[in-house]
Image (cartoon, grey):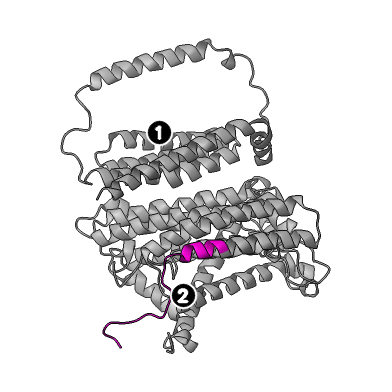
Amino acid sequence: MMNIVFAIIAAVTIAAAVAAMSLRNLIHCALALAVAFTGIAVAYLQLGAQFVGFTQVLVYVGAVAILVVFAILLTRGSEPPQQSVLSAGWIGGVIVTVIVLAVLVFAIAKSSAIRGTAPPQPPATVQQIGDALMNKFVLPLEVVGLLLTAALIGAVIIAMKEEGRK
Amino acid sequence: MADDLDQIFVTIDHSIKGLFPEPWQPVVSAIISIAALIGVFASLFAVTTVLERKGLGRIQNRYGPNRVGPFGFLQPAADGIKALIKEDVVPYAADKVVHFIAPLAAVIPAFLVFTVLPIGRNMVLVDFDAGVLFFFAVGAATELSVFMAGWSSRNKYSLLGAMRAIAQMISYEIPLILSAVTVIMIVGSLSTTRIVDAQAGYHSIGLPNWFVFTPWGFAGFVLFMIAATAETNRSPFDLPEGESEIIAGYYIEYSGFKFALFFLGEYMGMFAISGLAITLFLGGWHAPLEALEFIPSWMWFFAKLLAIIFVFIWVRGTLPRLRMDQLMNFAWKFMLPMALINIISAAIWHFMEPGYQRWLVVAGLVAASYILLGRGLMEGKKLEKRTYRFAE
């Protein structure tokens, strides 16, 4: 039962990811990417990580996908490109991909994580995640918050300058 | 007797489930509950369309629908048949696949969010540990459907409408979530059932223990309802539709049943977000007075839901539409700081001893920030009687 569900999720996610790479129309690619994000979120849910799964949907489908779509709309026309989606250097790309994959497979096969049985899954409730964020990891959390606020203000300032010049 | 009536739907669910063999029972139970949710809220949609048109007619001094059935109450059936047999026009230049998927992408999340709303005692479909987060995550997915509808139509007006809708939804989602955060902080849980449980019981003066009867809860509730109105694109925040300027926004190019699906999705969004407001601030399915507890819990949920829908209709018939800059100023200069201050006041409430000092401090903080922020928003604006050049 579990494996069938996982197979369906994996098939949908991979198909969407392949579509996101290979479709001609960029908006279609972005929408396929949103489907892939959702598939990953469902995979998290199946692993029992509710918080991560819902946050994945909230952040990636709700915000990142919208951002990608807006970026495409604002930077170029929505006409699909006439030339092939594969760039001329695809052979080089394939070689690099194979090398990276080989390194990853080698590293995973060597690591101790796959030997022996997996430890029992700890029940990660939202409460525990909140406790950890607010007690143990409060400093990194604040630093990240500060960094993001600075980035936000910086973005606003860049956007404002352009308007003042007119 | 009262208890039997209260749990009648749970009992029915259990008895139907009992007719099936053991391994099928969870699936059967899920199917029954889903069918019931879709049936109940879709019929509520039908009733609400008539009520809304009648109510708006009453406000605007006209009859509203009054031809089909007694007092026009069979109007939704006629509308449904009309939508079904109408030709489904797809523009020649439209992106056919995305154009087809968009209404489905709008309706499915709108129904999904009902699964975490407790609509009665023991009546919640899935009790997620992170129920409120699930609600907001699935709700955020509707933004993508709005974009798909606006973009795939290949129509300037629909794309403009979609851009407006997305800008508005993103801006108002922040105060919406921040105002809900206060309740999550006080309860200490994201589970909808635990939030409702935390609001059980009554004060000594007879008021129920709902969060709306605390200073931070009241401010949070008002902020939440304003943001919810904007999230569901209802008047006075219905600029994305703006029929007088961009015709109907992102669904200009939709006709027949696809348009009906969008309409359904919009109303479902309204019911769902009202349901969340009831869960967070209005005590869920709890009765407002101890003496009224004999009335079944699910009746209280739907009574509160209809009351909120009534307010939505009332507001729609009363307030004029905002301008785009007013909309954005209101969201970023008033709603957002107010929601942040409200979080701080909820934290103060949490750490102070119960008593009247707590009430004074928190209420003072909320009122002062309301007045100061309101003044700030009004600064530099001439608010006097409008003079007309030619009309007078």
User: Magenta span covers which residues?
Assistant: B372-392
Residue B195, given in percent of the width and then of the height, sits at 69, 55
Give the labeled residue for mark 1. A14
Q: Is residue B119 above or below residue B205?
A: above
Q: Nearer the viewer, mark 1 or mark 2?
A: 2
**In which quarter of the view is residue B7 placed?**
bottom right
Residue A156, given in percent of the width and then of the height, sits at 39, 45
Q: Is residue B213 above or below residue A124?
A: below
The dominant secondary structure in magenta is loop
Q: Is residue A22 above or below residue B162?
A: above
Residue at image point 57% right, 16% down:
A114
The Cα–Cα distance between marks 1 and 2, rounded to whole angstroms, is: 45 Å
Q: Is residue B9 left or right of residue A61?
A: right
**In which quarter of the view is residue B34 placed?**
bottom right
- Graded by Cα atoms within 10 Å as few (under 14), some (14 to 19) or many (20 or more), the crowding at tag 2 reads many
Closer to the camera in the image, B389 or B39: B389
Is residue B383 rendered magenta in the image? yes
The N terminus of chain B, quarter of image: bottom right
Residue type pointed to by label 2: Arg
Residue A155, given in percent of the width and then of the height, sits at 39, 42
